[in-house]
Amino acid sequence: MAKELFSTYSYLLDRTARKVKQYAQRRFNNEQYDITVDQWIIIKHLNQSNDLNQTQLAEITGKDTPTLTRIIDLLCKKGLTERRIHPTDRRCFTVHLTEQGQQTVLKWTPKMAEIRMKAWENLTEDDYINLKRILDTIYNNLDD
Amino acid sequence: MAKELFSTYSYLLDRTARKVKQYAQRRFNNEQYDITVDQWIIIKHLNQSNDLNQTQLAEITGKDTPTLTRIIDLLCKKGLTERRIHPTDRRCFTVHLTEQGQQTVLKWTPKMAEIRMKAWENLTEDDYINLKRILDTIYNNLDD
DNA sequence: GGATATTTGTTGTCATACTAACAATATGTA
DNA sequence: TACATATTGTTAGTATGACAACAAATATCC
C-alpha cells in the first residue's frame, strides 16, 4: 500500500461528495427552485416514510439532531413540512410533508434521477456494487 | 440500474467522507491537538510544496479561495503558517510553514498514516484502484 | 413513590462550503 | 498612454457539520 494513501482517498471522497452535491444544487438553482440538496434529501425520505420523529429522521438521513432541527426549521418556513405533536410522547414531534412538499417531491424526483444518470456515465452496475462495498467497509472500520 | 441509485450513492459518499474526517478529527482531539482536519490538509501540502500563492494552494487542496483565506487566517493565528509578500505580484501572498508548522507535520504524519490503515482494513490495493477510478469518473462526469 | 438516568429536541459556538460582490493590482489592447 | 478586462485575495450572507450544554419529558431503579 502506498504510503500516502490516506490523504489520497480521503481527498477523493471529499471532493467527489462535494462535486455531486454541487452539481445537483446547480440544477435546483438553474430552475429557480429555492431548496438545498440536504433539504431535498429530507423531504424525499419524508415522502417514503411519514410519522417519523426527528431522531428517527436524523438516523435515516445520516444527519445529527441539531442539524436536522435546523433543516426542518427551514423546510417549515418554506411551507414544505410541518411538525405535529406526538400523540403519546410529549417530547417528540412527528414531521410531515405538506401538500406543497409532496408536490415538490413529485416534481423533482425524475430530475434527480436524471442527475444520477449523468454522474454514473461510463460506470457499470458492478462498479456500483464495488463502490458500495468499499465505502461500507470504510464506514464500518471507523464506526464507534 | 436501480431507479433510486442516485440517492443511494450520493448518501454513501457523503456519510463516508464525513466519517473519515470525523475519525481523524477525533484522533486530533484525543491528543489535545488544536487543529482541524482541513487545516491539516493545508499544512501537509505546504510541507511538500512551498512558495505557492493562495489561489494555487486552493487549487491543489480542492478548496475555494474564500475558504482557503479563512483556513490560512486560522493557521497564521496558531503560528503554523505565515503569509509572505510576493516579490513581483503585489496582489498575492505566498504561504509558508513556520518552524512550528513543520514540527506539526513531522509529528502527525505517522499518526495520519496509522489512521489511514485503520480505515482500509479488509480492503486491498485493487479496491483502492477501483475506488479511485470510480470517484474520478463521477467527478469528471459532473465537471463543468 | 421518588430519586436518578435517559431521551428528545433546541440553542450556541466554531469551522467549512458556496455564492456574490468588492478593492487592489496586473494585463491586454486601442 | 489610457481604458477595459482579468486576477488575487477578502468580506458578507446563508447553509451545513460537529460538539457541548440545556430544559422538558419519560423511563428506570431502589
Image (cartoon, coloured by chain):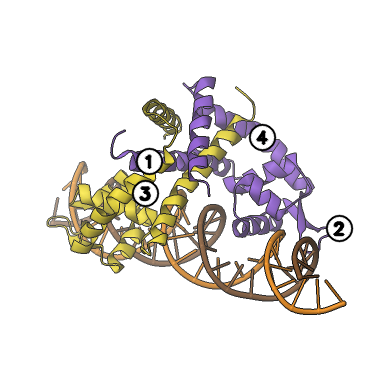
Chain colours: A purple, B yellow, C orange, D brown
Verify CB contact (< 8 Å) between mark 3 and mark 4.
Answer: no
Q: Nearer the viewer, mark 1 or mark 4?
A: 1
Q: Nearer the viewer, mark 3 or mark 1?
A: 1
Q: Residues within 10 Å of mark 1 (few under 14, many from 20)?
A: some
Q: Which residue is mark 3?
A: B63
Q: Residues within 10 Å of mark 4 (few under 14, many from 20)?
A: few
Give the SS element for disc 1: helix
Which image quadrant: the N terminus of chain A? top left
Q: Say above or below: D2 vs B5.
A: below
Q: Which residue is mark 2?
A: A87
Verify CB contact (< 8 Å) between mark 3 and mark 1.
Answer: no
Question: Residue B117 bears which disc, if any?
Answer: 1
Question: Residue A71 occupies which quadrant of the picture?
Answer: bottom right
Q: Is residue A63 left or right of residue B51?
A: right
Distance from disc 2 to disc 4, alpha carbons, whole Å, reads: 31 Å
Q: Residue at x 65, y 51 (%)?
A: A58
Give the SS element for disc 2: loop
Q: Residue at x 70, y 40 (%)?
A: A105
Q: Find residue A95 and report its horizontal and vertical position in percent.
A: 75, 52
Q: Nearer the viewer, mark 3 or mark 2?
A: 2
Verify CB contact (< 8 Å) between mark 2 and mark 4.
Answer: no
In-front residue for pair B102/B45: B102
Q: Say above or below: A104 vs B138.
A: below
Q: Say above or below: B91 vs C2.
A: above
Give the SS element for disc 4: helix
